[in-house]
Amino acid sequence: MSTFRLPDLGEGLAEAEIVEWHVKVGDHVRVDQPMVSVETAKAVVEVPAPFSGVVTALRGGPGDIVLTGAPLIEFDSGTVVGSMPATVDEEYAEADVAAGRRGDGKAAGSRAVPAARALAKRLGADLAAIQGSGRAGLITLDDVLKHANLPPGAGRPPDGNGASPGASASPAARAMAAAGPGDGTVEPLRGMRRAMAQNMSLSRDQVPGSTVCDDADLHAWSRRGEYMLRLMRAMIHAWRVEPALNAWYDPATQSRFLVAHINLAIAVDTPGGLIVPVVRNIEKQSPDELRDSIIRQKQAAHSRETLPEDLRDFTLMLSNFGTLAGRYGIPLVVPPAVAILGAGKVREDAVVVGGAVQAHRRMPLSLSFDHRCITGGEACRFLGAVIADLEKPD
């Protein structure tokens, strides 16, 4: 009997949601045969079978959240691809021995379940400073949460045993438990919406954000439209004037890494929720190439075909929320990036030019930044450079 555990599907993801099983108990599967579709942070991924054998148990159904490293499927297997230790404890005990570390629990920082390692990485926590409460000192998810002063269970899915929330439950949980069938419908956050909730919580807990706002006068433009292209061009110009905002910040070492290229994350609103794919090396692309890149990423987002690698390693962020509504906003920075530019709805404003009132089209801009490593002066210079480029004629 072999147990296959949910692997890390990219960039230390702590969990995934089961979307659809492609096999059932009793099926004989072959190596690399697709066996289940899972949704990670905004991307649907097919997980292939690592064994040739007969399926004996499925550990979860569609809609269930599975932590990285948790049992996913069991086989009466034949051929095994690679090494697959029976338990997470054994996997990291082997890693400890290979690295010459102790396995008696005293050097707890070197032993952690995959979900705990992923969460520690996201929070910038040093595993060596965390005391494990698991078997032989194994660090659990709750150990990392306790170290970060977050409530136990914050990184886990809600308890599905039907128990009524006690006095320690949130006001929302108590209100929902007391509501009757006619009062509304419970809608658990899944997939994209769940990832958004986690990223926004991460931003709230880690980033001491600040926002500056101003307007770009578009009166010199001879034609309308293609705001995204002009915004991207303006951000490239601003990066060359003030490169500090195209960076990653590491709170553990209190250092920032100024990135030598721009991988721009663009917010895309879809019926399933917000997805933020990345357009890479925008400073090297022509306007036509950028246009094609934007179209391709938007189409992939709406068809739920965004690749996992197209969601990571962004260095700067852009939200053109004005295509829907809104003048100014307070966009939230998602670590490790340090800045996000929001563009509001373009409209005609009354402006004074040479003592006379004229109607000019203006774009409201909101720039949020991580005040741990970005000064107000750096942010204002960046925003000023964005405005200066946007105000140029076509």
Image (cartoon, rainbow, N blue to C red):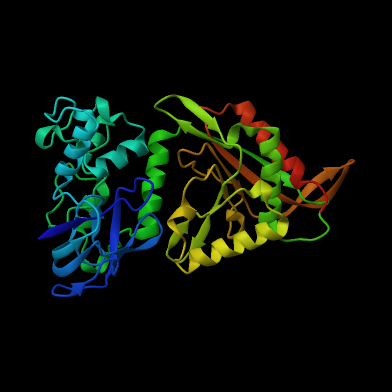
> At x 80% / y 61%, what residue is drawn?
223
Q: Quadrant of the N terminus?
A: bottom left
Residue drawn at 38 percent across, 46 percent down: 11
**Residue 91 to residue 361: above or below:** above
Q: Is residue 123 left or right of residue 263?
A: left
Q: In the visual, does 377 lie left or right of 19?
A: right
Q: Is residue 228 visible?
A: yes
Is 74 drawn above or below residue 111 in the view shown?
below
Say which quarter of the image contains residue 75. Answer: bottom left
> Foreground residue, 390 or 58?
58
Give percent across and percent down for residue 148: 29, 31
* The quarter of the displayed image where residue 353 is located: top right
* Residue 104 found in image quarter: top left
Residue 118 image position (x, y, % from top left): 31, 42
Name the residue at 19% across, 29% down: 108
Res. 371 visible in picture: no
> How far across and down, in percent of the image, does residue 268 sit?
52, 58
Apparent side of residue 292 relative to residue 257 in the rendered image (left or right): right
Depth order, front residue of 28/147? 28
Looking at the image, residue 309 sits to the left or right of residue 149; the answer is: right
- State the image coordinates of residue 72 (x, y, percent, origin top left): 20, 59
Q: Nearer the viewer, residue 29 or 117?
A: 29
Q: How many marks?
A: 0
Above or below, 135 relative to 199 = above
Tell me the quarter of the image containing the C terminus. Answer: bottom right
Q: Nearer the viewer, residue 171 or 333?
A: 333
